[in-house]
Amino acid sequence: MIESIIEKCKVLRLKAFAENLSDVIQMATQKNWPTSQVIEHLLDLELGSRRKSSIALRFNQSKLFEKPTIDQFDFSFHISPKNRKIES
């Protein structure tokens, strides 16, 4: 039965859902989770996976060589709205 669910998830392109199904069902059995919590957890895993894939795709499309971090950002480059003078 789990194999047919995994196949259907693959057809629906729910890769993370399918990959984690067996482990989540085992964990849910041990922790006595209700069905709704199991489904929500699997969907959260799928959403997280898609978010990571989306970020990786955008980074690859940006053709940047390294991933910038917040400590590397040059805050002096941007003029803060507080420091701007409004001329009338």
Image (cartoon, rainbow, N blue to C red):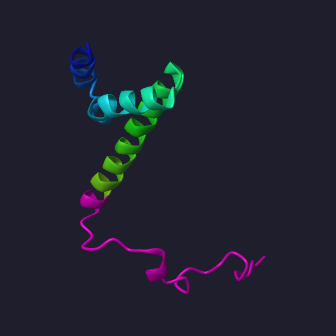
Q: Where is residue 30 in the image (x, y as percent from the top left)?
A: 44, 30
Look at the image and tell me in which quarter the C terminus lies.
bottom right
Q: Is residue 17 in view from this perspective?
A: no
Residue drawn at x 52%, y 84% as measured from the top left: 77
* Residue 6 in sight in this render: yes
Q: Residue at x 45, y 37 (%)?
A: 44
Q: In which quarter of the image is residue 20?
A: top left
The answer to if 70 sits in the magenta stretch is: yes
Magenta stretch contains residue 15: no
Q: Residue reaching furthest front? A: 30
Of residues 73 and 35, the one nearer the viewer is: 35
Horizontal arrangement in the rendering, residue 38 relative to residue 82 (left or right): left
Measured as percent of width and height from the top left, residue 57 is found at: 28, 52
Residue 59 location, x and y as percent?
Answer: 30, 60
Most common secondary structure along the magenta stretch: loop
What residue sits 41% from the left and 33% below the top? 27
Up-down relation of residue 44 to residue 11 (above or below):
below
7 up-or-down from 70: above or below: above
Relative placement, left or right, of 80 versus 82 is left
Residue 82 or 56: which is nearer the viewer? 56
Residue at x-position 25% and y-position 22%? 6
Magenta residue span: 59-88
Quadrant assignment, res 17: top left
Q: Quadrant of the N terminus?
A: top left
Q: Where residue 21 sits in the image (x, y, percent)?
A: 32, 29
Residue 28 falls in image quadrant: top left
